[in-house]
Image (cartoon, rainbow, N blue to C red):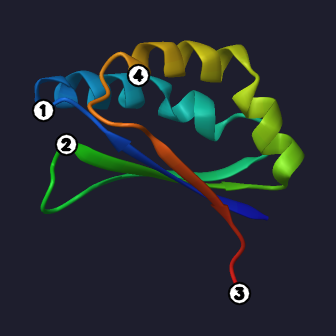
Amino acid sequence: MIKRIVKLTFKSSEIETFKAIFESKKEKIRGFEGCEHLELWQDVDHPNVFFTYSFWKDASDLEKYRHSELFKSTWKATKLLFDGKPMAWSVNEL
């Protein structure tokens, strides 16, 4: 299993827009083949910083998602709202 953490920094004026995008897509992402878990976190001290935390059966499932129309359309809308470069980590639990 792969755990994926993605840090997203948004323009303060776009926080609600991002939340609406995530709300409209989260069940589709959770239902994508290989996705076993998805959460959205918001930084306590920096409310324009969010993290997605997801579990994927394996790296190939994550790659299929990253090349899917669902990801491409979601990312296209989301990246317009950024106020910083996104960062991502794929990790294994020890």
Residue 3 in picture, x, y percent from top left: 65, 62
Residue at coordinates 61% horizontally, 40% vertically from top-left? 30
Q: Which mark is residue 26?
A: none
Chain-order first, disc 3 or disc 4: 4
Q: Which mark is residue 48?
A: 2
Pointer 2 with pointer 3, Cβ within 8 A: no
Q: CA distance from mark 1 to mark 2?
A: 6 Å
Element type where label 1 sits in the image: helix
When the figure is inspected, residue 55 is found, relative to residue 8, above or below; the finding is below
Q: CA distance from mark 1 to mark 4?
A: 14 Å
Q: Is residue 64 left or right of residue 49?
A: right
Element type where label 2 sits in the image: loop
Q: CA distance from mark 1 to mark 3?
A: 36 Å
Residue at coordinates 62% horizontally, 17% vertically from top-left? 72
Q: Which mark is residue 12?
A: 1
Q: Quadrant of the N terminus?
A: bottom right
- Outermost front residue: 85
Chain-order first, disc 1 or disc 4: 1
Q: Which mark is residue 94?
A: 3
What kind of residue is marked 1? Ser
Q: CA distance from mark 4 to mark 2?
A: 13 Å
